[in-house]
Amino acid sequence: MSKNNISKDILFGVAIGDALGVPVEFLERSNRVFDPVVDMRGYGMYQFPAGTFSDDSSLSFCLAEALTQGYDLQKIANNFVAWLKEGYWTPHGSVFDVGEITMQALTRLQKGCDRPDAAGGTNEHDNGNGSLMRILPLLVYIKDKPIEERFQITKQVSSITHGHIRSVIGCFYYLEFAGQLINAVDKFQAYKNLQTEIPIFLHSMQIDDEEIKWYKRLLSENIYELPENKIRSGGYVVETLEASIWCLLTTDNYKDAVLTAVNLGADADTTAAVTGGLAGLLYGYDAIPKEWVNVIARREDIEGLAERLDKISEL
């Protein structure tokens, strides 16, 4: 896979997965056993039409939009605040879903912070999936940089809303996995590569080993061998990352990957958005069912954003 022209894969990969999960967000997995999601549907939890994406995609688009003008952490933070206050990059002009930890961080930004990356919570309980869900567009900017720089930039962008090292590690692992995919590394080989590369790097950065251990199922086990009942799909960053990698490794196409994620239940839209981003990179935009792309909210706007974001690779 080429390292160029990946923005469309990322943005639509995230948004389609997200929109599939929005109508069934927060419903238990048992609901999906009797009523599995098999296609794009509307209404449900939020009473919006099919193709409506949530904060997962909106904040991803806010990040991508900022990056089209170069890397400016304050601009990224300003876009996040504009999303919350003005409905910037929302599907229908208003915010209908925002995580508590993200809301707290954006409130701090509005009140004034010394630095944008000082706004995110740093308590152990601040490890929701809110930075993981919107981090993938950063790949376009960092993909050719040294690993130390990739880590530091990822830490900065995560910390706008989620500053604890556990969230940072989750975002870093996710982007490193994505980086392997755009270099045409087999997904299972990528998984194995990271089991060596991630711990070595994190130890070199003197990251607390107790924090690294939270990711032991990804870093020292074959998570794809686990049955579905061992995969959790709540709003905790470790759970979301594990679930997304499991969905990617236990399926062989975009459609099945995101539907598997949605049907895990609970935080269905975020699990599917995170899964969808990787699946979009792995299988490409053309592998996403066209009937899903055709109903996604603001499709032409997303296409335009993808074109602008791809141009930063040429700078």
Image (cartoon, grey):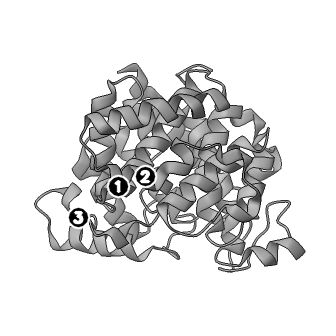
Question: How far is the residue under mark 3 from the one under mark 2?
Answer: 26 Å
Image spot of residue 302 (x, y percent): 57, 46
**Residue matched to label 1:** 210
- The amino acid type, in three-letter code, at marker 1 is Glu
Q: CA distance from mark 1 to mark 2?
A: 5 Å
Residue at x 29% of width, y 56% of height: 159
- Is disc 3 surrounded by few (<14), some (14 to 19) or many (20+) residues within 10 Å? many
Work out whether residue 64 can be spotted: yes
Which quarter of the rendered picture does the C terminus lie within?
top left
In three-dimensional space, the C-alpha distance between marks 3 and 1, rounded to whole angstroms, equals 24 Å
Q: Residue 118 got which mark?
A: none
Report the disc number at residue 213.
Answer: 2
Query: Which residue has dot 3 on it?
Result: 119
Q: Position of residue 255 (x, y in %)?
A: 79, 47
At mark 2, the secondary structure is helix
Secondary structure state at the residue bearing disc 1: helix
